[in-house]
Amino acid sequence: MNDFNKQLVGLHILVAEDNLFNQKIIQKFLNLLGINVEFANNGKEALALLEMVKFDAVLMDINMPVMDGITATQQLRSQPRFAKLPIIALTAAVSEAERDQYMAAGMNDMISKPINPTLLTSALVRWIKFRGVMATDSDIVPESIETVEQEPPIKELPYFDKTALLVMLGNNQDLTDRLLVDFKEDMQNFPAEIAAMITVKDISSIWAHIHSLKGVAGNLGALQLHAAAILLQTQLKEGLPTAAMVNDFNAVFVKTMSKITLPPQPAIVSPQNTGNSEIVRHCINELDALLREHDFIPEILLNNLMENLATVKFKLFIRLRKLIYDLHYQDARLLLQQLVVLPDIQETL
């Protein structure tokens, strides 16, 4: 970690973001920077958390259910104690008019989706000078707003470019594969859902559905699908999309999903009856150190631990691995301690 990023270690940041995939990506990236993260699923939850917990900054998504990011920011800025709280917008909208709207609401900066990890880090350093110390106006470097470049036609884009995603996830290929597979499973009914909304002419729901897909597709590096979603969402400003537009979108959707394949699944084997306590102890110490630092957890380490556990500890290990896959590192450390104290032999009455 360079000196530039060291300024962020130990910070406590609130992320208001309603999409689970985006939450996982942002959490992993910020944890790798040494930042503690809490999430709110909408602006109302963000306001409630800020009443109870002190945060060094807020990353605020714009389009959220219940209460959007602009409304939440306006309510925060109406309170003097939040006047200096850095609020950075996370949004797929990058027009000058929209940027002006966010700044007028009281936001300090804007990062467009898909999230560029370098720009996000730069914005955090720019608005939070040192740990727990807010930068004053004289310390602020004028924000650099991203320029929108003309993208090539959809068919000329690659289906996937996972470069930024891998940076956000600390080059964790296993986690990248898991997120993509989860995305494919969660989105399998998407075309049918859009078709049903078109049937009842529910334009607002179609827009929200496409908007959510667009943000996740962008952050996952699904370039063709992201571009197709933008095109379809643009059409919605004029009314219902034509059948040809929907068919074109669905073709890109199906092809993109076909590119996502299940990675080799970790072997689930029954461990030895009594296990190998020496190897287990070594694995647990190494795993705990990685969890403490929110670092990459190699699959080979988890498999080595699993293969040398006593049978009685196997179910606990399955829960542990799921917590790690879901990035719940603090809970994983607690469960790891249970694994340590659990006897290798089941006691009988």
Image: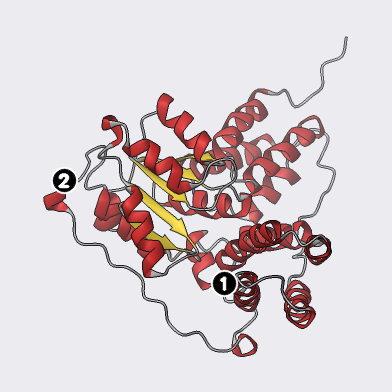
| In the image: residue 163, left or right of residue 338 | left
Residue 266, horizontal then vertical, whole percent:
76, 55
The circle drawn on residue 162 is 1
Residue 328 visible in the shown view = yes
| In the image: residue 277, left or right of residue 328 | right
Q: Residue drawn at (31%, 45%), measured in percent from left and top?
A: 86
Q: Is residue 213 above or below residue 247?
A: above
* Of the two numbered discs 1 and 2 in the rendering, the one whose residue sits closer to the viewer: 2
Instruction: Please report whichever mark, 1 or 2, sits nearer to the chain's N-terminal start.
Output: 2
> Which residue is at the front of the view, 105 or 91?
105
Residue 110, horizontal then vertical, whole percent:
37, 59
Where is the C terminus found, in terms of image quarters?
top right
Label 1 to label 2, Cα distance in Å? Answer: 37 Å
**Disc 2 crowd, CA 10 A, few/some/many (<14, 14-19, 20+):** few
The circle drawn on residue 136 is 2
Res 121 → quadrant: bottom left
Q: Residue drawn at (63%, 75%), measured in percent from left and top?
A: 235
Q: Residue drawn at (52%, 34%), measured in percent from left and top?
A: 45
Residue 306, horizontal then vertical, whole percent:
73, 44
**As shown in the figure, which amino acid type bears the numbered disc 2?**
Thr
> Which residue is at the front of the view, 20 or 98?
98
| In the image: residue 255, left or right of residue 338 | right
Q: Secondary structure at mark 2?
A: loop
